[in-house]
Image (spheres, coloured by chain):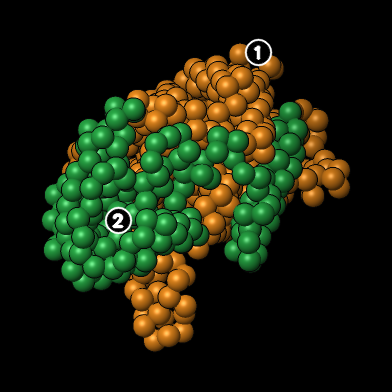
Chain colours: A green, B orange
Amino acid sequence: MGVIFFIFNAVFALVLLLMVLIASIYAIASKNPDTRYQPMRDDRGSFIKSQTQLNVGAELDALGATARGDKNGSRTWGGSGIGSQKMRSTIDDDDSSFESEVPSGMQQTHNNNLYAPNGHYRDSSYSSQTGHSGTFMPAAGYGGPTPGSRNGGGGAYTPKGATPWQRGAGYE
Amino acid sequence: MELTRHAGIAYTIPDLDGKVQVYINDTNTGEELACVEAEMSNGKSVYQKAVGWVTAIIAVTGLAASAITSGLGHTNTAAHVAANALSLFGYFQAQAFIGMCAVPLPPIVAAWTQNFQWSMGIIRVGFLQKMATWYQRATGGTPSSLLSSLTTTSVAVQKRSVDYLEEAYQQLVKRSNSASTTQQPSTVTTVRGIERVGFRANIEITNIFLTGYTFFIIFVLFSVLAVVIFKYVCELLIRSGRMKGDKFVDFRNGWKTVLKGILYRIVLIGFPQMVVLCFWELTKRDSPAEVILAIATIVVMLGVLAWAALKVWRIAQRSIAMHKNPAYILYSDPVSLNKWGFLYVQFKATAYYFVVPLLGYILVKGMFIGLAQSSGTTQAVALVIIEAAVLIAISVLRPYMDKKTNGFNIAIAAVNFLGAIFLLVFSDVFNQPVSPILYLRNDI
């Protein structure tokens, strides 16, 4: 009896070890290991921020800016499609809320009507990065005006590289 | 004296559960004067250092690979590799758990499960053992001296229910030594369960808890150091221009959060080990300080994991309220993903909560093994029930992120359940014939 226990456990352990080893080596050695795995059924891929998504966001920003006929320089923003602007220079933890950040030299407007249909946002301000960085793009569940990034406003601002560490609305 | 010849096969099978009987007959009358029966071992065993090392290296490689892949940005791959490595680790710990049960195990089973005791932190390092003995003595405990007194004390590794056999043995000793003038006191101490595991690893019984505890702390410190060093090496390489600036950028910007995530991950990995050892220490009480360490550690670890699980729950609830599905904030918020991700990424989004029943499973299993060392049958029965429940839950709910991962974990749960059934067979519930097998050292 003990021998049977040993045999099936030894074989099983060997199989598992080989699987993990092969998966690990493939993950490190391959240029694009994600191709091996199917996208998740719960569609989490569309939620996870990554560098590529942020760059796409930057391009869309530029497109949106051109469509609106923006130019660099100070202006006032009115109407829909406006959020507040914040500068993010440090990576914050969930201990500090983004409301505590003070935007430097930026115009700040609140638009409480932006997500009115949803009605769940406590405040509609969301952090976005200025310059050539990406924006927080909510998933396709929302209709209404596309929330592009807020470019311009105020005087000179330093463009920041896109990082996925910025957080969007509703986070602590 | 004529020695019976053994079959040649007896020299090659590892962990032979064999007996040798020596009959001492009077040459003149042929009368049987004495009979000695003892365990026979050919020195071969499936307990090999290499097995422990290879399994440990592969498990750690899996974890490291997932960390590196995640830093490089391949989140899907990282999640898969991490989930599988974690499950593999869980399987090793389950094998170690079986070895720790106070059930009389066949030698081959005891030897095989001993290969995985490194996942419980039971590793023998010379100076650590000295430090453990010192610590216990310094804090008011009395170290055992089982290993150092092997010449005068026979240590019986529990094979079948030996409690009444110990008495029988003592009777035998008294009878056989009654005529001789040079009597040597020989005592028999039986080791079972966790004590047997420590004994087999050449660790004093009273040092077992501190050994496991120390290795857990070493694991934590080593990982923290590795992350910090990696961060600064990355910065150096980028500043000197040898590495492109876009590699590992997510990690470099948010490395403190990533570090917190790694620490939580380590607490999760060490949770089974510490549950068993801490609760066991409460029954052994090697020294007052060690008892306090045990209580403090288990409270802190439970607290940390409960807090993390609660956060995940709250984030998921908020996500459901705001976005109608729990995955949204859990996956789009990079801080949540990196700090608490290890608790839910391996599951599908709707089963984000499944870590809670899993933690409960480990806690209950560990408590049974740590607290019920005096009754192997209780442990075996409890293990069968617990593993059956987990197998059913995972098979029905299929909470993992995709088919492959579900299959992986269902297979592990099934093998664990089978192991528990075997454990029940090894314990005496089915009334198998009892054969007396003891390590004897008699001076006749």
Residue placed under numbered mark 1 in the picture: B431
Secondary element at tag 1: loop
Q: CA distance from mark 2 to mark 1?
A: 78 Å
Residue appearing at x 29%, y 42% in the figure: A80
Q: Quadrant of residue A159?
A: bottom left
Q: Position of residue B173 (x, y in %)?
A: 53, 30
- Residue B225, visible in the rendered structure: no
Q: In the displayed image of the protein, which residue is found farthest to the front?
A: A69
Other residues around mark 2 within 10 Å, as few (<14) / some (14–19) / many (≥20): many
Residue B137 higher or lower than B229, as above or below: above
Residue placed under numbered mark 2 in the picture: A150
Residue appearing at x 46%, y 84% in the figure: B242
Q: Badge 1 sits on which subunit?
A: B
Closest to the camera, between mark 2 and mark 1, is 2
Residue closest to the eye, B178 or B242? B242
Secondary element at tag 2: loop
